[in-house]
Structures are given as structure tokens and as C-alpha cells.
Amino acid sequence: TNLYRGVLGTALFTIADGSTTTVLSCSVLTPAVAVADQFKGRVMTFDRDTVSANLRGQATVVNSNTAEGVLHVALLTTAPTSGDRGVIT
């Protein structure tokens, strides 16, 4: 039961085209963003098998987000490419 509840608090993302090292556009964000700054202060971590090898396992803090699913984050070492995936905890 506790594991299930923990998983319910995790958001999944997939990066879209046009992202930079600090502004990330998401093609998929589950749950969908309902309001601005919904994910502010949370940590996003790229999957260990994500498309961009330099981002595998890398984590960053979400500084803000728009209601359209654009995330503003602390500086990443590499700009993500379309299809990069991970979780927001």
C-alpha cells in the first residue's frame, strides 16, 4: 500500500523538440499540468536509459512551470532532445 501511494505522487515526463538546458518543453506530462507552478520545487530525474546519454540519471530542480507544461529548471549539463524521459518526484 505504501509503495502504491508513493508511485501515485510521481509524475512522468517526455521531452518535446525545442528544449534548452533550462527550459524544457514536454510532449507528455502525467498527470497533466492544471495550474502554473504545480511542480515548483520538485525534482526531475532522467531515466537511466533515456535517449541522451549525458542526461542518464541526471536530476535537477523545477524552478517553475507554465500551465501548458513548459518546465523551467536549474541548469542541466546537456539540452534534452525529443523523446528523453524521466520522473518528477
Image (cartoon, rainbow, N blue to C red):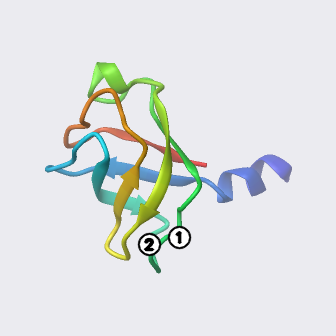
N-term mark: 2 or 1: 2
The x and y percentages for residue 36 are 44, 76
Q: Which residue is mark 1?
A: 38
- The residue tagged with tag 1: helix, strand or loop? loop
Instruction: Give the residue type that dot 1 points to.
Output: Gln
Above-or-below relation of 75 to 17: above
Q: Which mark is residue 24?
A: none
Return the residue found at the far bottom. 35
Is 59 on the left-hand or right-hand side of 55?
right
Residues under numbered marks 2 and 1 in contact, where contact means CB atoms less than 8 Å apart = yes
Return the residue found at the far right. 1
The x and y percentages for residue 70 are 32, 62
Q: Which residue is mark 2?
A: 33
Q: Residues within 10 Å of mark 2 (few under 14, many from 20)?
A: some
Above-or-below relation of 38 to 47: below
Instruction: Give the residue type that dot 2 points to.
Output: Val
At 78% across and 46% down in the image, what residue appears? 3
State which quadrant residue 85 falls in. Answer: top left
Is 67 on the left-hand or right-hand side of 30?
left
Is 26 on the left-hand or right-hand side of 19?
right
Is 75 on the left-hand or right-hand side of 52?
right
